[in-house]
Image: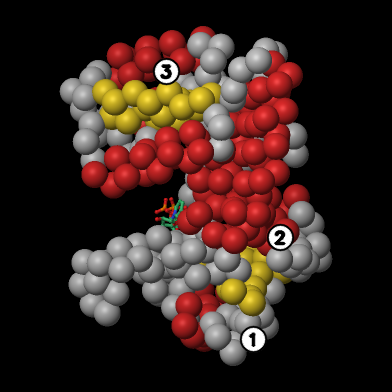
């Protein structure tokens, strides 16, 4: 079985990205800039933001980091985003989710200019993706596509099954696979007899957010299995360990290829965030 390593793919793509960043800086006299706004003190969000800032700087980009208290009002947060929308040094704006209770994340995300939306989550960018004119695609599904491309997994004409239909993962994943000429089936919590559907997939992307819920019997022999799930259960065999939606150990000797967790899709999400920021910088008028 081929172990689809997102860690390796991200490492490989970093060199090409660094070259693009250098060439952008030479041409424009400035570095691509990513602004990250963190609201409140959620410890997991703090770790994610620290990693994003570290990666931004390591790649030779400009990092703008704003910590605002959880007591900030929705209107003030939207004003902060509007200020960053106008800042010519900023190419990408990321408001770390989840937001504190009571805040409307959708409204905050929508306040980001689609030209400065490296997560690809504004309706403007999701709409362009649907219309086949994508500016940037959401980082996690875009990272899955990069893994499949790196390992030369054929997509055209294959039956791809996506488990999950969230706006951030499942729906854009299905659209990207469709664009790559797969025949796509999307499953969700109301799908009847889920495994009978996933067993038909040549490529199965699992993004259901259910820890270790699918094993060998959910896939046909020789399938390509991509696990987007990310969990750290508080009890059981995987207590305090990172695991996915798929029981990866059951894929050995059965699947043609599969992503592990950790080391699969996870590392690609941050890589594609950086790539999307650089793309937005390249598209910007400066
Ligand atoms: P989400 O918003 O909770 O969506 C989960 C989707 O899965 C929903 O569409 C839901 O169906 C479906 N679903 C739930 N239980 C199911 C079941 N038993 N059978 C079939 N479908 C089921 O989650 P998300 O934001 O898309 O994220 C999915 C997973 O990916 C999570 O584990 C998350 O932590 C992980 N994730 C990882 C990364 C990364 O960098 N690796 C990035 C983002 C997310 P309904 O629509 O019917 O409710």
Q: Nearer the viewer, residue 8 or 280?
A: 8
- Mark 2 lies on a secondary structure that is helix
Tell me, for residue 81, which label it has, or none: 3
Q: Nearer the viewer, mark 2 or mark 3?
A: 2
Q: Nearer the viewer, residue 135 or 17?
A: 17
* Mark 1 → mark 3, Cα distance in angstroms: 48 Å
Q: Position of residue 169 (x, y in %)?
A: 52, 50
- Would the CB of label 1 be found within 8 Å of ligand 1? no
Tell me, for residue 221, which label it has, or none: 1
Characterize the local packing of mark 1: few (<14), some (14-19) or many (20 or more) Cα atoms within 10 angstroms: some
Q: Are marks 1 and 3 in contact (CB under 8 Å)?
A: no
Does label 2 or label 3 sit earlier along the sequence?
Answer: 3
Q: Residue at x 21, y 27 (%)?
A: 70
Vertical order, 227 against 3 (above or below): above
- Mark 1 lies on a secondary structure that is loop
Q: Nearer the viewer, residue 121 or 83?
A: 83
Q: Position of residue 101 (x, y in %)?
A: 22, 35
Tell me, for residue 74, which label it has, or none: none
* Mark 1 → mark 2, Cα distance in angstroms: 22 Å
- Left or right, 81 with respect to 30, comes to left
Q: Nearer the viewer, mark 1 or mark 2?
A: 2
- Would the CB of label 2 be found within 8 Å of ligand 1? no
Tell me, for residue 150, which label it has, or none: 2
Vertical order, 118 against 234 (above or below): above
Does label 1 or label 2 sit earlier along the sequence?
Answer: 2
Image region (quadrant) for ligand 1: bottom left
Q: Are marks 2 and 3 in contact (CB under 8 Å)?
A: no
- Left or right, 246 with respect to 276, comes to left
Q: Residue at x 60, y 87 (%)?
A: 254
Q: Position of residue 286 (x, y in %)?
A: 67, 13
């Amino acid at each position: 079985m081929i172990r689809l390593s997102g860690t390796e793919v991200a490492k490989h793509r970093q060199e090409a990205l660094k070259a693009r960043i250098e060439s952008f800086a030479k041409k424009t006299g400035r570095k691509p800039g990513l602004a990250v706004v963190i609201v409140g003190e959620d410890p997991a969000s703090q770790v994610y933001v620290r990693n994003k800032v570290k990666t931004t700087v390591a790649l030779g980009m400009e990092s703008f980091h704003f910590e605002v208290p959880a007591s900030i009002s929705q209107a003030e947060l939207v004003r902060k985003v509007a200020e960053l929308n106008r800042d010519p040094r900023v190419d990408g704006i990321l408001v770390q989710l989840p937001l504190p209770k009571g805040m409307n994340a959708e409204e905050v995300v929508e306040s980001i200019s689609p030209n400065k939306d490296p997560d690809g989550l504004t309706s403007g960018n999701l709409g362009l993706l649907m219309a086949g004119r994508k500016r940037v695609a959401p980082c996690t599904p875009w990272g899955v596509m990069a893994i499949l491309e790196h390992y030369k997994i054929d997509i055209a004409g294959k039956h791809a099954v996506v488990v999950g239909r969230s706006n951030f993962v499942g729906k854009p994943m299905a659209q990207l696979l469709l664009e790559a000429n797969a025949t796509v089936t999307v499953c969700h919590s109301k799908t009847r007899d889920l495994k009978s559907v996933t067993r038909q997939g040549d490529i199965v992307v699992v993004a259901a957010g259910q820890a270790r819920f699918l094993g060998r019997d959910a896939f046909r022999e020789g399938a390509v299995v991509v696990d987007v799930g990310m969990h750290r259960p508080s009890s059981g065999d995987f207590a305090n360990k990172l695991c996915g939606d798929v029981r990866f150990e059951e894929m050995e000797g059965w699947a043609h290829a599969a992503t592990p967790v950790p080391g699969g899709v996870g590392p690609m999400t941050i890589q594609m965030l950086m790539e999307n920021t650089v793309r937005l910088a390249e598209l910007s008028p400066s």
